[in-house]
Amino acid sequence: MKTTIIVLIFCFVAAAFADLYDTKYDNINLDDILKNEKLLDVYTSCLLDKGPCNTKEAKFLKEVLPEALINECKKCSQKQMDGSKKVIEFLYRNKTAIWKELTAKYDPLGTYQKNHQAEFDKLNQ
Ligand SMILES: *[C@@H]1O[C@H](CO)[C@@H](O)[C@H](O)[C@H]1NC(C)=O
């Protein structure tokens, strides 16, 4: 009986974790990317189908971004969640042109932006 319970608990935990995105890129230094025009361009070109996605990180991002936007990063680790917020804020504030292209492609109905209106309003202040 005890074993069954332990096995059951283990299965639940395993299932919960299996549903998260891969965390192998969690230690990527976002500041390095955001502050480096060239690097940022590599990532955004990939996301916007304007260039090759020739890094694993960019490919990964392109794969998970559409879903993560819809489900509020439900499968994100805390680090991925914080990182997404940081990147979104940076692009919104500092890279308006890129931000507009990205939202036109990945949030055409403005759903994400509507759901986060309060946070965007704060950034505008
Ligand atoms: C905008 O860019 C500046 C300079 O790189 C940076 O210090 C600032 O944190 C950026 N803003 C946001 C919201 O990330």
Image (cartoon, rainbow, N blue to C red):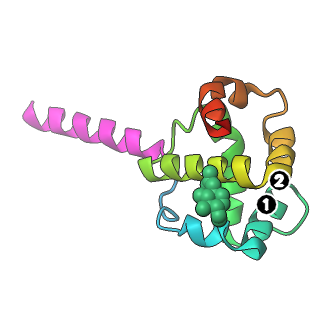
Q: Is residue 5 magenta?
A: yes
- Asked if the residue at tag 2 contacts the one at tag 1, i.e. Cβ–Cβ closer than 8 Å, the answer is yes
Q: Residues within 10 Å of mark 2 (few under 14, many from 20)?
A: some
Q: Could you tell me residue 46's position as x and y percent? A: 81, 62
Which amino acid, by three-letter code, is at mark 1? Thr
User: Eyeballing the image, is 125 above or below 46?
Assistant: above
Q: Could you tell me residue 24's position as x and y percent? A: 49, 64
Q: Which of the two discs, 1 and 2, labels the residue nearer the N terminus?
A: 1
> In the depicted view, which residue is nearer to us: 46 or 18?
46
User: Eyeballing the image, is 67 above or below 30?
Assistant: above
Q: Give the spatial CA distance, label 1 vs label 2.
A: 7 Å
Closer to the eye: label 1 or 2? 2
User: Eyeballing the image, is 5 above or below 94?
Assistant: above
Which amino acid, by three-letter code, is at mark 2? Ile
The magenta region covers: 1-21
Q: What residue is pinned by disc 1?
A: 44
Element on which disc 2 rests? helix
Is residue 57 visible in the rendered image? The answer is no
> In the depicted view, which residue is nearer to us: 98 or 23?
98
Q: Is residue 96 magenta?
A: no
| Residue at x-position 64% and y-position 69% | 33
- The numbered dot on residue 102 is none
Q: What residue is pinned by disc 2?
A: 98
| Residue at x-position 80% and y-position 68% | 41
